[in-house]
Image (cartoon, rainbow, N blue to C red):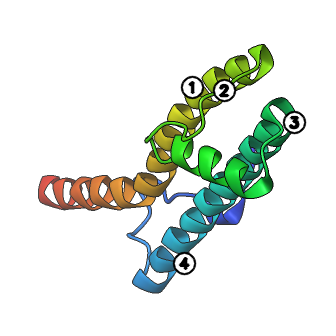
Amino acid sequence: MRQLPLFRYERRHQPLLAKHHFYRRVVWHLLVVVGLLLASLFGGMCGYVYFESLSWTDAFLNAAMLLGGMGPVNNPMTEGGKLFAGMYALYAGIVFLVGAGIMAAPLAHRLLHRFHLEVSAKDQ
């Protein structure tokens, strides 16, 4: 299976990636996380507008607070709104974990790859 070039990581027998390519990889991962957060924020806003009939500003505030881990500002009043808020809160927790993993991936890979190269050089 072929990987996209920006998500392709060097294998253990390959040399360490040059710094400018590594920085490009980190920026690409950052852009992916920002896109995920913006899409999640927009989905949350749409849900609050639909289920709770909130204004777009209030919907933004509630969705942003849930994505940030703080909790909603306006308590849901409808049954649909309560179900949506609960599901969105669970989703927001998963988005946080996935985003943290995507951001940590290039850093962790570089650290482990460097460690493996140093160990391999000593063994030979």
What residue would you read off at disc 4?
24
Q: Which one is nearer the viewer's eye here, 16 or 90? A: 90
Decide: few, some or many residues near mark 2? Use Cα within 10 Å; few <14, some 14-19, many ≥20: some
**For marks 4 and 1 on the same chain, the one whose residue lies earlier in the sequence:** 4
User: Mark 4, mark 2: which one is toward the viewer?
Assistant: 2
Amino acid beneath label 4 = Arg
Q: Quadrant of the C terminus?
A: bottom left
Outermost residue on the top side: it is 79
Q: For marks 3 and 2, give the one nearer the viewer.
A: 2
Q: Secondary structure at mark 4?
A: helix
Mark 4 or mark 2, which has the lower sequence index? 4
Disc marking residue 50: 3
Q: Residue furthest left?
A: 122
Q: Which residue is mark 1?
A: 90
Badge 4: how crowded within 10 Å, few (<14), some, or many (20+)?
few
Q: How far apart, in angstroms, are the residues tagged by discs 1 and 3?
A: 19 Å
Q: Earlier in the sequence, mark 3 or mark 2?
A: 3
Instruction: Look at the picture and state if 8 lies above or below 69.
Output: below
Residue at 49 percent across and 42 percent down: it is 96
Give the residue number, with chain letter if any, for mark 2.
76
Q: SS at mark 2?
A: loop
Mark 4 and mark 2: Cα distance apart in space? 42 Å
Which residue, as the protein is rendered here, is positioned at the far bottom? 20
Q: Residue at x 49, y 69 (%)?
A: 26
In front: mark 4 or mark 1? Answer: 1
What is the CA distance from the residue labelled 1 to the residue labelled 2? Answer: 16 Å
From mark 3 to mark 2, how far is it between C-alphas? Answer: 12 Å
